[in-house]
Amino acid sequence: MEILIISLIKIVVVLLVILTVVANLVYVERKMSAFIQNRIGPNRVGPWGLLQSPADVLKLFIKEDIVPTSANRTVHALAPLISITVALVTFAVIPFGSTIQLFGYDIQLMIADVNIGVLYILALTSLGVYGVTLSGWSSNNKYSLLGGLRSSAQLISYELSMGLSVVGVIVVAQTLRLDKIVELQSGLAWNAFLTPIGFVTFVVASFAETNRLPFDLPEAEPELVGGYHTEYSGMKFGTFFLAEYANMITSSALIVTLFLGGWQFPYLETFNLPPMWVSIIHILTFMVKVSGMLLFYMWIRWTIPRFRYDQLMNLGWKVMLPLAIVNLFVTAGGLLLLG
Amino acid sequence: MSINSIQVRGKDLSFWQRTYIPEIVKGMALTLKQVFRPKFTRQYPEERWNPPSSFRGRPVLVEEQGVERCVACGLCARVCPALAIEVQASETELEKERYPVKFEINMLRCIFCGFCEEACPEEAIIMSDEYELVFTNPDDAIYGKEKLLMSTDRLKTRLEFLRKAR
């Protein structure tokens, strides 16, 4: 019973934190794009424009919800829900801190302690493609359909290199538990340094998985009007928007967990701090690392132009996949030689 | 075109260049540098723009010693390509003998070409520096004499500019 209540509290807290961060992430992205383009960005709504995102969400709630007459209504309504669910549920197995002692309980700072955490994440991220594909198909619009098709092709191609670069990490860690993987990366023994090629392929693949800019072909505006969400309006569109940013957070958290030492602060144990402080520093470290990753996502988005579709496929199959395989062999060979 | 003509790249790239990594790093450095550069944005309603004297804002009638210079010759109305100006002349006791009883410019029609200013023999209608024109219905867009009159003090820079240009 206690475990259930603790889990419920953890779920609510994490969900609230993610949703707030998503809202503010839109603001941060707009500010960042503005700075990169020598503009100021939103600064009219509230102090420094901080209320811009709440205002936008409110607007999306008030707007009329239009469903095309020839659309498949059930699937049309279901698709955004699939997207957002997958984006949020993936966060369940990511450890965002070690353990914290509150009210006499030792609370482990991850929602679900699953012993196949990595597999769970890989399974769910590939479910995410259903949201995009079904929304494209059910809208009964050729551009939406093209966006959905592209997205399914893209996600499936990059899933391979993503999975294979994770295998490198698993080979090093000898476990599928994400908390164990983080614990093994103490000090500066981060997997990013142990398997650098795997790190690069994983980051590139997660850009493709989250449909972010160098690979945002499913919503390539100049070619596809709006992409898979052309026929969505109101909060259904808002849900896709939310899912994109939630996906960004989840994949940043995943990159941090798998490759950048998770919540580990390098050499924190040498300071002999009280355990409460250590727990808090761990959570803060995780947050700082994830926000760093998120800023990197945005920085890339406003720097690199979109790939052409054939370039995307070439990169995925002819470069990323062989690189991931090479990474796997190098890591396994290195492990064999060094013990 | 024979079948053997294979497309040759204009420039052979080295392996390192073909990975695009140096170019990506260069681009990222560029965008990072832009973040710290001064911004171009003008915070408009607070920070206004003062147009140079060559700017053609809304046309106004020059008011000298409480009276408009206009002698209602109708040349501006004749030259106006958008047919925005309407003048009705009448006689007056003043030295100029003629004056406009009615002088209306439909600001929805006006295209700010400045032909009226060029055509005017009396330098009576000129383009001011005002560029904020707001009306909530089409009737408000028709500016009568009371809205068009503007004193010479306000129009000093434009009048000087016109003398120089002539």
Image (cartoon, coloured by chain):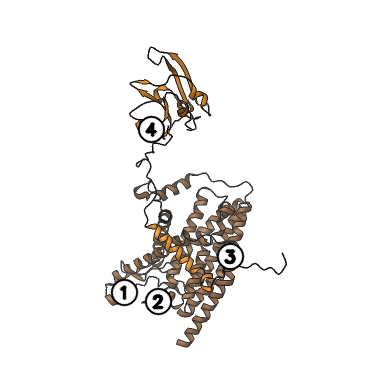
Q: Amino acid at mark 3?
A: Gln
Regarding residue A296, the answer to whether it shows in the image is no
Question: Between tags 2 and 4, which lies in front?
Answer: 4
Image position of A133 with respect to B125: above or below: below
Location of mark 3 (residue):
A311
Q: CA distance from mark 1 to mark 3?
A: 44 Å
**Residue A335: image location, x then y, percent:** 47, 84
What chain does mark 3 sit on? Answer: A
Question: Mark 1–mark 3 contact, CB under 8 Å?
Answer: no
Chain letter for mark 1, please.
A
Chain colored orange: B
Mark 3–mark 4 Cα distance, whole angstroms, equals: 58 Å
Extreme right residue here? B2
Q: Position of residue A188 (x, y in %)?
A: 37, 76
Q: Chain of mark 4?
A: B
Instruction: Tell me the amino acid under the disc marked 4.
Output: Arg
Q: Give a yes or no on whether discs 1 and 4 share a subunit.
A: no
- Asked whether the residues under marks 2 and 4 belong to the same chain, the reply is no
| Among the two numbered marks 1 and 2 on one chain, the one whose residue lies closer to the N terminus | 2
**Horizontally, is B135 left or right of A284 in the view?**
right
Asked whether the beta carbons under mark 1 and mark 4 sit within 8 Å of each other, the answer is no
Query: Disc 2 designates what residue?
Result: A185
Bin the neighbour count of mark 1 within 10 Å (Cα to Cα): few under 14, some 14-19, many 20 and up.
some
Tags 1 and 2 touching, CB below 8 Å: no
Quadrant position of residue A19 = bottom left
What is the CA distance from the residue labelled 1 to the residue labelled 2? 13 Å
